[in-house]
Amino acid sequence: MDSRVVGIPEVDGTERVAVVIDVMRAFTTAAWAFHRGADKIVLAADQDEALAVKAGHPGWLALKDGAPAGGFDLLNSPGLIQDADLAGRTVIQKTTAGTVGALAVAEATLALCASFVVAGATARALRDAGAGSVTFVATGEDGRAAEDLACAEYLDRLLTGGRPDPGPYLHRAGVSPAADALRGGRRRGAHPADVGLCLEVDRFDFAMKVGLEEDMAVVRPLRTRPGAVPAVHGAR
């Protein structure tokens, strides 16, 4: 399988199969939201759009990164969302990088959102789809975020049929500037458990597929065929 890694600025609309990666924290948080029962996640480009969508759907919950703000119900933190009751709920997610990247490829033939917690399922989804080539979109730091690049390389190794040790990839993510900022309390809207939760491999058995529904970019969990890629639960 051919692959390339780009940042959001390099997305040009020609991507047929894309995997949008945001390890810390958008697509780790999204996976936890599905685990806690969310039905779907609607992606918003900015805070104003998120609040406008919520105004049209009063039962939906709005989620943002950074500090709490009026109108938002949830924060972009796996540690803060891991005990939330989201059964049957729709979450509107707005983040600085992850949702922007996903919106950029929402019209691709197959677009998946990924992080380490859904790595194995993401690789299975790509194999099940018969993808011959894939574009990895590393969203953090305009494509330079160490944790996103490490996840992209890990996924690439899975797709080439290897059984890679996740340890070195998790180490790179764990010593990244993003992880350091979270540990040091320099990210608002964070939880002390966030870094550890972002460094779990295959915590969940579903991929996360982006599609267009009623002019909105919507993420839904995608259950995948078991066994195509070996899972490494809870590796650090």
Image (cartoon, grey):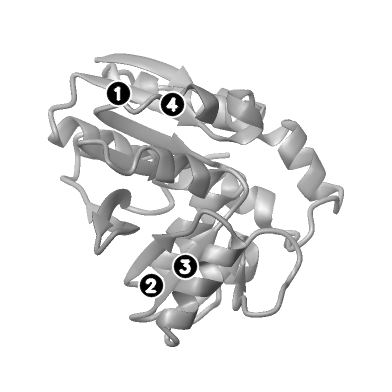
Looking at the rendered structure, the secondary structure element under dot 1 is loop
Q: Are marks 1 and 3 in contact (CB under 8 Å)?
A: no
Query: Element at badge 3?
Result: strand
Q: Earlier in the sequence, mark 2 or mark 4?
A: 4
Q: Identify residue type, mark 3.
A: Ile
Q: Is the residue marked by circle 2 packed among few (<14), some (14-19), or many (20+) residues within 10 Å?
A: many
Crowding at dot 3, Cα within 10 Å, few <14 / some 14-19 / many 20+, comes out as many
Q: Where does label 3 land, which residue?
A: 92
Q: How many angstroms separate mark 3 from mark 4 (CA)?
A: 23 Å
Task: Tell me which corner region of the image, top left, top right, bottom left or bottom right, holds residue 108.
Answer: top left
Find the distance from the CA under tag 1 to the CA under tag 4: 8 Å
Which disc number belongs to residue 231? none
Amino acid type of disc 2? Ala
Asked which quadrant contains residue 162, the reply is: top left
| Residue marked by disc 2 | 38
Mark 2 or mark 4, which is nearer to you? Answer: 4
Crowding near pointer 1: few (<14 within 10 Å), some, many (20+)?
A: few
Mark 1 to mark 3: distance in Å?
A: 26 Å
Task: Report how far apart the C-alphas of labels 2 and 4 lie in the structure.
Answer: 29 Å
State whether residue 114 appears in this view: no
Secondary structure of the residue carrying numbered label 2: loop
Task: From the image, tell me which residue sits under label 1.
Answer: 14
Assign the C terminus to one quadrant of the image.
top right
- Circle 2/circle 1 CB separation < 8 Å: no
Q: Is residue 127 left or right of residue 36?
A: left
